[in-house]
Image: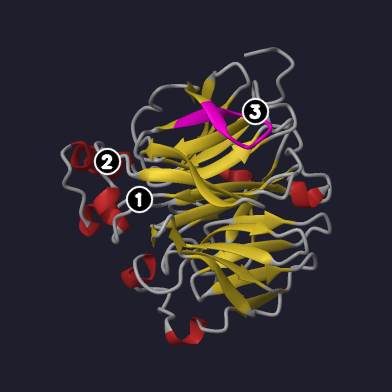
Amino acid sequence: MKADNPIKNFTLNREEARFIGQDLQRPECILAEPDGSLWAADARGGVCWIKSDGSQQIITQKYAERINHESGSVNRFFEGTLPNGLAFASNGDILISNFGTDCLERMKRTGETEVLFDTIDGREIGKVNFVLRDSKDRLWITITTMKKNWLDALRPDLDDGYIARYDERGIHIVAEGLCFTNEVRFDAKEEYLYVVETTGGRVLRYRVDAEGELHNREIFGPSRMGDGAYPDGIAFDSYGNLWGTMVYSDKVFVITPDGEFKILIDEGDHEKVKALDEAFWEKRVTNEILFQTGRGIAPWMASITFGGRDLKTVYIGSLRAKNIPYFASPVAGLPMVHWK
């Protein structure tokens, strides 16, 4: 690792974690705005707006009240509206990848919601996981799997995930054959699109041409990230380090620009993660085995977001916490397109 890399000697210390938000439900993805406010996905069917003064407001979609689930119910991970990945549209509306209703939605900040896509090329779109908007106002959408129950996709030999792009030409599949497709991010110049394969245990990247077509698929960083390698969310810092989370093993990692891999914090229960790993490779993952994992400051760590007015605060989104932990970062995050 280069000597001038700000994360060379950096680790995350759980004792330094602070927390924001309360009674959140499944705050999987977090968006940060320059004024210090946060928007977190919420299983009540919409988002929770955490304002810069710490106050919060739940904004639910117009249909959410008829398919909500209690926060203690396992069903909230499998049924009904499950806002997952979020992005801001150019006018400030919130784009929602709904992992429960299998569609991409657009929600105004007052809650009115429309479905943008639930099919592609004449077929059901599948498990819509994440959405990213680039500087050309194109949308990049990840589909995790075509399985109705995502638990059935937690196996090492399934690669039915894909990436779609939406622009003035419509929506098109641009990459296929992916193992549990999760978050995607661009580098600073938008030359490469980086994509997480959760069950592949790795990050891939594609070169992006002027037309938005993807080429030269390659592994970025290690080909597998060790025990409990279930990467989920990623985000770049301004140095070019790619930060990420591992969802069931509760780790935060970083991959440097030259591909070096480092764990920044490990909150997981190693014995229960080992049991999950064994079940995963033997293709016998069950609810009981899976839900034994998840502990620490943000059980089932799912995403990384840089925020704060100087972009030097790291927020960790998760699937099972009721608040959001955050840390001071030694380096500012790469500004997302809505920040500029």
Mark closest to the chain's N terminus, 3 or 2: 2
Q: Position of residue 4 (x, y in %)?
A: 74, 16
Q: Position of residue 320 (x, y in %)?
A: 44, 61
Residue 262 versus residue 86 in the image, above or below: above
* Residue identified by numbered label 1: 145
* Residue identified by numbered label 2: 158
* Residue identified by numbered label 3: 241
Residue 181 shows up from this direction: no
Spatial CA span between label 2 and label 1: 9 Å
Q: Position of residue 109 (x, y in %)?
A: 71, 74
Mark number for residue 274?
A: none
Report the front residue among 212 and 258: 212
Give yes or no for residue 214 being in the magenta stretch. Answer: yes
Q: Are marks 2 and 1 in contact (CB under 8 Å)?
A: yes
Spatial CA span between label 3 and label 2: 29 Å
Mark closest to the chain's N terminus, 1 or 3: 1
Give yes or no for residue 64 being in the magenta stretch. Answer: no
Report the front residue among 319 and 213: 213
Q: Amino acid at mark 2?
A: Leu
Residue 200's image quarter? top left
Please rate how many residues cluster around mark 3, counting C-alpha atoms within 10 Å: few if below 14, some from 14 to 19, many from 20: many
Boundaries of the magenta span: 203-215
Q: Residue at x 52, y 75 (%)?
A: 45
Q: Residue at x 76, y 37 (%)?
A: 332
Q: Amino acid at mark 3?
A: Asn
Left or right of 163 on screen, residue 10: right
Left or right of 193 on screen, residue 199: left
